[in-house]
Amino acid sequence: MRTPLQLALVAAVGYLVAGGLIGVALLATHGSTAIAGAAAAAPTAASPAPTGPPAGFQQVSGPAGLTTVIPNGWQVSSIRNGFQADDPANGGASGRFVRYQGVAGEADLFTWLTAYEKQSWSTQPGYQRVQMSQQKYQQNPAVLWEFTYSLNGESRHVKILYWNADGTQYDVYASAPASAWAQTSPIFDAMAAGSAVR
C-alpha cells in the first residue's frame, strides 16, 4: 500500500505529463513551432515599408487611387484624365512638365498604343520612336514608350509608362525639350519608382 506522499507524487507526475501532452496537441493544432517561453520571431514583411518621396520630391494623389511623386514646387493643374505638373521656371507645352493619369483600361495596352502611335503621332513633325516595350509593372501588364518629336521647330523628348491595374489604365509621363532631357529623365524615373495604386 502506498503512502499519502507517494500518491501525491504520482498524481503530480500525472498532471505534468497530461499538461505537457495537451500543450503539444495545442501547438500542433495551431501550426506553431514556437517553444513555450521563447520569444516568437516577428513576421517578415512581404515588401519593404515605403520610405516616402525622395529628396526634392513630394507625394501627390491622382485619379482612381493613384499616388506618385513630383518635384517640389511644380505647379499642378487638372487635365482631362488626371493632372499635369509644370516646371515653375519653364513649364507648359514648350517647357518641362509631367503628367499622372488614370482612365478606363484597354485590354491589350501594346496593341492599343501601337495603333495610337500610328494614328496620332507618326504624322507629327520629327516623330521618332526611341522604344516601345512590353513589361510588367508591379505585377501588372505595362508598356514603356519613349519618343522624340518637333514642336515649333524645337526637338522634344517624351517618356511614358502605361500599366493596367484592376480595370484602370494608369500612366506617368514626362516631357521636355531635348536639350533639358538629361535633367528631366531622373524625374520620370522617380515617378515610375514612386507610383502606387491604393
Image (cartoon, rainbow, N blue to C red):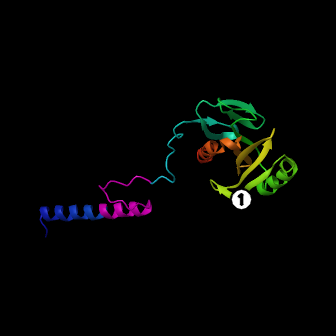
Is 106 inside the magenta-drawn segment? no
The residue lying toward the viewer, choosing from 54 and 31, is 54
x, y percent for residue 138: 62, 53
- Name the quadrant containing residue 100: top right
153 in relation to 77, above or below:
below
The residue lying toward the viewer, choosing from 162 and 26, is 162
Query: In this figure, what is the number of numbered marks?
Result: 1
What residue does disc 1 label? 134
The residue lying toward the viewer, choosing from 2 and 87, is 87
- Name which residue lies at 39% across and 63% down: 25
Image quarter in which the N terminus is found: bottom left
Is 25 inside the magenta-drawn segment? yes
Magenta span covers which residues? Answer: 19-43
Label 1 SS = strand
The residue lying toward the viewer, choosing from 21 and 135, is 135
**Relative side of 198 to 6, left or right:** right
124 in relation to 74, above or below:
below
- Name the quadrant containing residue 81: top right
- Name which residue lies at 75% across and 44% down: 155
Q: Residue furthest bottom?
A: 1
- Name which residue lies at 30% across and 63% down: 20
Residue 82 visible in the displayed image? yes
- Name which residue lies at 70% across and 44% down: 178
x, y percent for residue 182: 63, 45
